[in-house]
Image (spheres, rainbow, N blue to C red):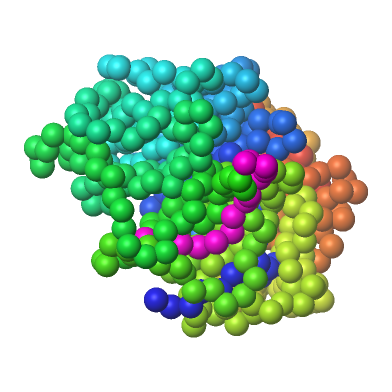
Amino acid sequence: MKTHYWVRASSSDFTGILPQPRSGHTAVNIGKSKIVVFGGLVDKKFLNDVTVYDIENKLWFQPECTGSYSGGQVGPSPRSFHVAVSIDCHMFIFGGRSGSKRLGDFWVLDTDIWQWSELSSFGDLPSPRDFAAASAIGNRKVVMYGGWDGKKWLSDVYVLDTISLEWTELSVSGTIPSPRCGHSVTMVEKRLLMYGGRGGGGPIMGDLWALKGLIEEENETPGWTQLKLPGQAPSPRCGHTITSGGHYLLLFGGHGTGGWLSRYDIYHHDCIVLDRVSAQWKRLPTSNEPPAARAYHSMNFVGSRYLLFGGFDGKSTYDDLWWLVPEGDPIAKRRIASPSEVMSENRNTTMVNDVLSGTKEDQMEGSAVLELQKRLEISVLHSNPEKIIDEMEDTEFVQLASRVVGEGAVEKREALRDHWMKSTPRSITLKELSPLLRDYQRLITRHHIGKAGSNLQLAKYGFSGKEAFRFYHVQNASQVKMVSFIGLLIICFWLVSI
């Protein structure tokens, strides 16, 4: 097993606006293209925002979601300690907690068009709960186990068919695990592995179980089996993560008991691997200082790397991002970083400013994205730089500008922008929407990303980085609601004015 290194994410790893501090959130992989972070809790405030990491383009953004409403807002109400599972391009959300209330609503987010839908469920609908755990079964079904309903710990198993939207409570014979919450479940081939959690009466557990009978084609009677594997097993814990990566399942973090005099106050930052080939527990060899101990964080597998975000240690809620990478990974080379290379704690500032400090304006001629890729040796914002083209190569933009004002390259493009600044969303024609969106993306690339100190400009004009990037990820103007174009116009006005 290769030695791994913990490396705090640096300013060269990402662009865009990072998620704010939180714990009890969910972060699911949508294929190999993106990670979607939803909800969580910070300073007794429950969240319902969606923040996305575009893996290929190394960009964090907050999509403009549409769809069903809850409590006057688009999407599910604020919550934490819910379950989230991805099937193809969809993220399914169930339950969680908001304040002292346990939730039992059921939602799906289509990440292709960023549309929320509250689903009408059929069959044996699970009771409201938090601290449950769920996993995908293939590319159609979801299995959920346990949780806490506010009065008792649960040990029920529910299977959701994401096509029919029917929930079925699985009838399990034989010995079953004790009721619990804060555990983890992971589907490994034909079995659901469940580890740890906090059980009835409050004890924190360290048992490992396997559930069979979830694959219809196998015709197996559903049943639990407790597994006792050799090796260095993890200590009992809850609020941990288990992340699948190749032949290994990586367990990280969580909290456990410190004995009779100091119960539930021990937080962990160890890495334990369940080797699927040899069927034993192993300690992952790491050669440097790990992140602060924590629970209720998220850990996602990205290529050969793991990405850790957020969590809680009994006192503080974290907003840091860490890589766990194997030896030989380029990121491992910078594991001993100078303070200037470490990501700023202030998540309201975009990290790309540090990367581009000292960039001269004359170096930004031509395609800004191509220049950024050349200088930083990374893919910035779009995998295809041709998506952001120069004004004079944007045929629709040029033709539209010619209708507004006569010939004259500079004059007509500025006249078109002036026309947009004086417009209202209702006065803009459908033919103008796509050129307007592309021009906004050009301006963001040049002014917000391409110039150091642009965040100071943002603050001066009363904008946050989040607002400036609000529409950057949108690939088609039809994905922007008509009422949102006023925000796009305001941002464009700011970009032109600086």
- Across and down, in percent, residue 141 comes to 28, 36
Whole-percent x, y for residue 373 in the image: 60, 73
Image quadrant assignment for residue 49: top right
Residue at point 49%, 48% (across, down):
236
- Does the image show residue 377? yes
354 magenta-colored: no
Magenta segment includes 273: yes
Q: Closest to the observer: 484 or 46?
A: 46
Q: Is residue 479 visible?
A: no
Residue 156 figure quarter: top left
Q: Position of residue 318 (x, y in %)?
A: 69, 50
Q: Which residues are magenta?
A: 260-274
The residue lying at 46 percent from left, 56 percent from top is 234
Q: Is residue 448 left or right of residue 172?
A: right
Residue 280 coordinates in the image, percent (x, y) = 32, 63
Q: Nearer the viewer, residue 203 or 24?
A: 203
